[in-house]
Amino acid sequence: MRERYKNALMWGLYAALVLLILVLQTVSFGRPRFFGVKLCFVPVLVACVSMHVGSEAGCVFGMACGLVWTLSGADGGAMHIVLLALCGAVAGYLCDRYLVRNLVSALLMSLMCLLFCQLVLFLFKCMVSSIGIQGLLPVLAQVGLSLLLCPPVYLAAWAIRKAGA
């Protein structure tokens, strides 16, 4: 019974972390632009949590984060559900098989998730609108600035995992 309680506590704390990150992203950092771009924290969160919980749970976590983010009015719409599920599965798999779970791996997985999500959304916007290749520089700036949130999110995900283990 104690193991089920700790597992439920861990996932409850991860859900609270998701809500905290979404509030930070949409309320605190929703209006200001840094170097002309808005910050994107959810792929960083998915990468940091997925590397601790594994590929299957990371995929489900990414899908849930994508769903909540889409329902809160994300720019890319429902594409985030699929993109974040793929990011969670790949980040969890790579950390299960090849990488050590530390801050360097978290930075690498966060960079991978941010690049994947933002480049797919950029390519989609290129197809449906008249954004040219000159729109790629703000995407790269957004990825670089959003990566700055990785260390505190990694530490929070690590502490939650320790509480649930």
Image: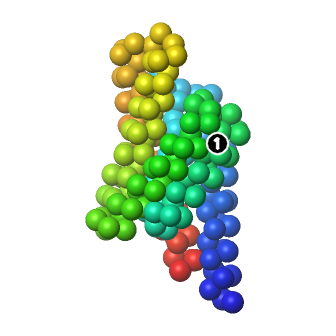
Q: Would you identify the image quadrant in which residue 61 lies?
A: bottom right
Tell which residue pokes out farthest to the bottom in this image.
Answer: 1
* Residue 22 in view (yes/no): no
Q: Would you identify the image quadrant in which residue 32 lies?
A: top right
93 on left or right of 79:
left
Residue in view at x 52 percent, y 16 percent: 128
Judging from the image, the colouring scheme is rainbow
Q: Position of residue 19 (x, y in %)?
A: 67, 52
SS at mark 1 in the image: helix
Residue nearest the observer in this picture, 94 or 43: 94
Is 69 above or below relative to 73?
A: below
61 on left or right of 4:
left
Give the quarter of the figure containing the N terminus: bottom right
Is 158 above or below relative to 20?
A: below
* Residue 117 in view (yes/no): yes
18 on left or right of 140:
right
Q: Position of residue 74 (x, y in %)?
A: 63, 34
The residue tagged 1 is 69
Tell which residue pokes out farthest to the left in this image.
Answer: 98
61 on left or right of 148:
right
Circle 1: is it few (<14), some (14-19), or many (20+) Cα within 10 Å?
many
Amino acid type, callout 1: Trp
Residue in view at x 45 percent, y 26 percent: 122
Residue nearest the observer in this picture, 28 or 110: 110
